[in-house]
Amino acid sequence: MGVIGSQLYAHSWGIDRTFLGETYTPKSKSIGNSQVLNRDYFKRDEIEVVIREMGDQVATRLRRENLSASSISLWVGYSLSYIDEDGRKGFSKQINVDATHSSKQISEYLLQIFNKNYYGQVVRNIGVTCSKLEPTTHHQISLFEDTKKLDKYDELDKVVDTIRQKHGFTKLVYASSLLKGGRAIERSSLVGGHAGGMSGIEGKNDEKK
């Protein structure tokens, strides 16, 4: 049985030759977050609020690890008994972009995906993933982008991250999180693992752990 025969023989005698000191490097790394909403969401504007919040949360995690993403994915799951006109229970789409860790840009990309695929479905689950990660060493600027505006976004993100890290997430939130449908403030007050993915929206006490 060749190599596999030797492995089976070793395992039958309780022998495992795996070297535990080897560092495992995943083939591809990604940063994401998903949540089950507290109720069914019927209105586009309320769903968009949640997507913006999640985009900001994942972007915050990217900046903490000094990473940028060039692939943005959005997964939307419908209410338990809801099936759309195409017979689907949800949709998952991905786009490739210039590498970024900007909260504003990532949220805008997510909303682009959402608005191309949403036509009134009843939503209960949302997932966001950023992949094709690379160290943030420089900006890849498009000829059509305003560099001054990009620098402004970067400075804003730095200020927001600093204030939240020092005083807690709820001390500085985007206005949209105060609108009906917003979930970030409520989730930030949940305890540990019960928040369904706290990283990026922790309260002040959680950050000290």
Image (cartoon, rainbow, N blue to C red):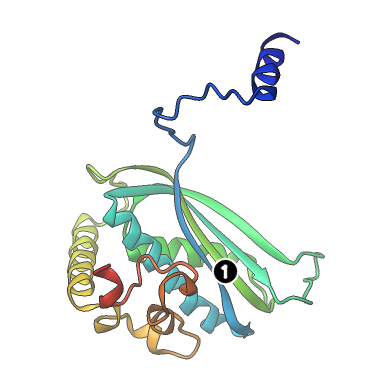
Q: Residue at x 23, y 74 (%)?
A: 164
Query: Residue 200, how many percent across, how many down?
Result: 35, 66
Query: Residue 74, how many percent across, how many down?
Result: 55, 60
Residue 3 versus residue 94: which sits nearer the camera? Answer: 3
Q: Residue at x 80, y 65 (%)?
A: 86
Rendered view: 3 above or below 51? above
- 130 relative to 86 in the view: left or right: left
Residue 189 versus residue 148: which sits nearer the camera? Answer: 189
Query: Residue 188, how many percent across, how many down?
Result: 38, 78
- 39 relative to 32 in the view: left or right: right
Q: How many marks?
A: 1
Rendered view: 199 above or below 6? below
**Label 1, on which residue?**
126
Q: Residues within 10 Å of mark 1 (few under 14, many from 20)?
A: many
The secondary element bearing badge 1 is classed as: strand
Q: Residue at x 44, y 33 (%)?
A: 24
**Residue type at the position of mark 1:** Ile
